[in-house]
């Protein structure tokens, strides 16, 4: 259904008001497709509400393939050719019927036909012709499953995702490619990148091994896993192809090189950062996949609780000052900053960023890319931005004294500035900045909020289950008392069994755990006296700040993640 028709349907079914529709259109220059996304981003509706409305329009049930994800072994009970051609997904089996999801209007109307193609001999010479026989789809499925069949609507993106269940493992596709093509490099690289985009892969590693093979690993939800190997004899062509596409020197094999590639397929664009370094067995390639998913990111989907969202919105609405996000590389700092920018982006504000690299692009925001070749550094770019009449400035990272000084001055002179700092936790951020020779009085006057964060894996919704365990048993395993976090003697916790949807890991997707330190008068006074991290921590905790571990414990209780995950990324705080 076209986006314009979806908007009208949402109004007619009273999921949104006509005023909501007009607001969405006026905010997106009457672009109907973007207006639908706008309604989701502003929390007026969800994609599941859109699916429910569309299902009602077809007068069929809505099958939510996000809440209940059928395992691969169930999805593939439908013949692949039929499932792909008619866009069918096996949803679930009930006691009295089989439920099949689809976004095909012919299927939902009950008019879909299953086409049987057969060859028949023609004439005395034994020629052949194809004969097409049409059969009622529902009747044929009833014969297949020996049960009544019920069709329901599911969102197109969810149907697309489940149809990937029919794809062969990447390793076996490598073999097929090498058997089929004389020059395999383009086909292998395209297959790998496409798989990475579909499977939420953040990094792709090509690693030459001692046994003359090249191991290919994907980082999914922060963890590396091997997905296949290719013979070293094919790797030189793969290496040269990536170097050419990322504008690197193909004749250089003994120094690190960096570049970038843009992949386009099916109207989807994926920007890929490329890093190549020499190792003792050959050159290693790491591809960082930067899919433009920022349109689906909101403060709520990051894993922030209501209290933290309220604090963040308050800081983001101030006319000037500085908000800093801290954490290690890959902890989601940029994603958090982009989510903040989206909440405050408006026609009346000039928002400019200086980044290295520009990971996502937001409509209406001016993005500047750091460029070492032209000496466009964070500091030099920031100076230029301040001459561009900005209201809000985002600095990708405060990594040196000069950038820190300019950032502080920008926040002092009527600008709201967002940036990141590398520090172990929120309380270490103040000492870290003061070590950059920033005047304590200026820092105290400008800093509004410090956010520390880490990423944890979420329990797979397709195989989650509860179990009970005694606190004493947990404490023996961990070696630390948990009484202040779990006062009860027996706990009910969650974990994933492992299924085909999560690669049998029990985890699928990631969420953030956060520590918020709001600059109160007491902390501003402390900042004037060169405080240690411990001093900052004591006052922050007295003012109600939670540690990363405590925020993680909340998510353990809610069934978002496991205790093992929280312990993996966050230090258990010492008792006061």
Image (spheres, rainbow, N blue to C red):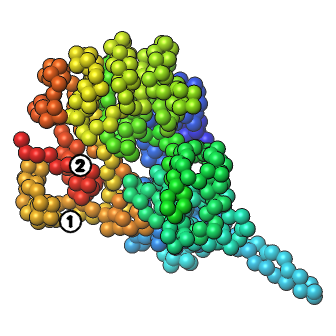
Whether residue 455 sits left or right of residue 104 in the image: it is left
Does residue 100 appear in this view? no
Whether residue 99 sits left or right of residue 306 in the image: it is right
> Which corner quadrant of the image does residue 84 belong to?
bottom right
Q: Which mark is residue 570?
A: 2
Whether residue 296 sits left or right of residue 459 in the image: it is right
Dot 2 falls on a residue whose secondary structure is loop
Mark 1 or 2, closer to the camera: 2
Image quarter hosting the C terminus: top left
What is the crowding at mark 2: few (fewer than 14 residues within 10 Å), some, or many (at least 20)?
many
- Which residue bears the numbered disc 1? 467
Q: Position of residue 397 (x, y in %)?
A: 39, 32
Q: Foreground: 28 or 327?
A: 327
The extreme bottom residue here reads 124
Image quarter hosting the N terminus: top right
Say whether disc 1 or disc 2 marks the residue closer to the N-terminus. Answer: 1
Q: Position of residue 121 (x, y in %)?
A: 85, 84
Q: Foreground: 343 or 206?
A: 206
Q: Residue at x 26, y 28 (%)?
A: 435
Q: Foreground: 125 or 135?
A: 125
């Amino acid at each position: 259904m076209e986006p314009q028709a979806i908007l009208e349907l949402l109004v007619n079914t009273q999921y949104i008001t006509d005023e909501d529709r007009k607001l969405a259109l006026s905010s997106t220059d009457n672009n109907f497709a973007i207006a639908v996304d706008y309604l989701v981003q502003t929390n007026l509706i969800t994609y599941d509400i859109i699916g429910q409305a569309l299902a009602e329009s077809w007068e069929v049930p809505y099958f939510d393939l996000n809440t209940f994800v059928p395992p691969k072994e169930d999805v593939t009970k439908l013949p692949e050719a039929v499932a792909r051609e008619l866009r069918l997904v096996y949803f679930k089996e009930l006691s009295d019927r089989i439920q099949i999801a689809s976004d095909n209007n012919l299927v939902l109307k009950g008019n879909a036909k299953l086409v049987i193609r057969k060859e028949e001999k023609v004439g005395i010479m034994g020629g052949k012709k194809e004969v097409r026989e049409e059969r009622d789809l529902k009747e044929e499925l009833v014969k297949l499953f020996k049960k009544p069949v019920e069709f329901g609507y599911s969102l197109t993106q969810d149907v697309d995702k489940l149809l990937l269940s029919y794809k062969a493992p990447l390793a076996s596709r490598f073999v097929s490619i090498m058997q089929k093509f004389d020059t395999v490099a383009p086909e292998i690289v395209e297959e790998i990148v496409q798989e990475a985009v579909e499977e939420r892969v953040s990094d792709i590693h090509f690693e030459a091994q001692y046994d003359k093979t090249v191991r290919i690993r994907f980082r999914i939800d922060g963890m590396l896993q091997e997905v296949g190997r290719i013979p070293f004899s094919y790797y030189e062509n793969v290496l040269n192809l990536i170097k050419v596409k990322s504008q690197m020197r193909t004749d250089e094999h003994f120094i690190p090189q960096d570049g970038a590639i843009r992949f386009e397929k099916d109207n989807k664009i994926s920007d890929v950062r490329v890093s190549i370094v020499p190792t003792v067995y050959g050159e290693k390639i790491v591809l960082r996949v930067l899919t433009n998913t920022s349109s689906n990111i909101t403060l709520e989907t990051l894993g922030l609780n209501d209290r933290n969202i309220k604090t963040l919105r308050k800081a983001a609405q101030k006319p000037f000052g500085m908000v800093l996000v801290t954490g290690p590389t890959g902890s989601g700092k940029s994603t958090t900053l982009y989510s903040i920018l989206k909440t405050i982006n408006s026609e009346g504000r000039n928002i400019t960023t200086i980044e290295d690299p520009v990971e996502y692009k937001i409509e209406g925001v001016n993005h500047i890319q750091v460029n070492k070749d032209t000496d466009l550094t964070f500091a030099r770019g920031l100076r230029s931005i301040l001459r561009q009449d900005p209201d809000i400035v985002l600095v990708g990272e405060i990594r040196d004294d000069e950038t820190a000084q300019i950032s502080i001055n920008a926040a002092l002179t009527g600008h709201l500035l967002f940036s990141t700092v590398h520090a172990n936790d929120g309380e270490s951020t103040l000492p870290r900045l003061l070590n950059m020779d920033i005047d304590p009085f200026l820092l105290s006057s400008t800093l509004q909020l410090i956010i520390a964060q880490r990423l944890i894996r979420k329990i797979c919704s397709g195989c989650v289950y509860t179990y009970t365990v005694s606190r004493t048993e947990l404490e023996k395993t961990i070696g630390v008392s948990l009484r202040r976090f779990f006062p009860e003697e027996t706990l009910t916790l969650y974990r994933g069994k492992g299924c085909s949807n999560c690669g049998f890991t029990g985890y699928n997707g990631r969420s953030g755990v956060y520590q918020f330190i709001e600059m109160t008068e007491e902390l501003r006074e402390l900042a004037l006296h060169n405080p240690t991290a411990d001093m900052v921590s004591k006052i922050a905790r007295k003012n109600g700040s939670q540690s990363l571990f405590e925020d993680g414990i909340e998510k353990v209780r809610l069934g978002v993640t496991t205790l093992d995950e929280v312990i993996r990324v966050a230090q258990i705080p010492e008792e006061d």
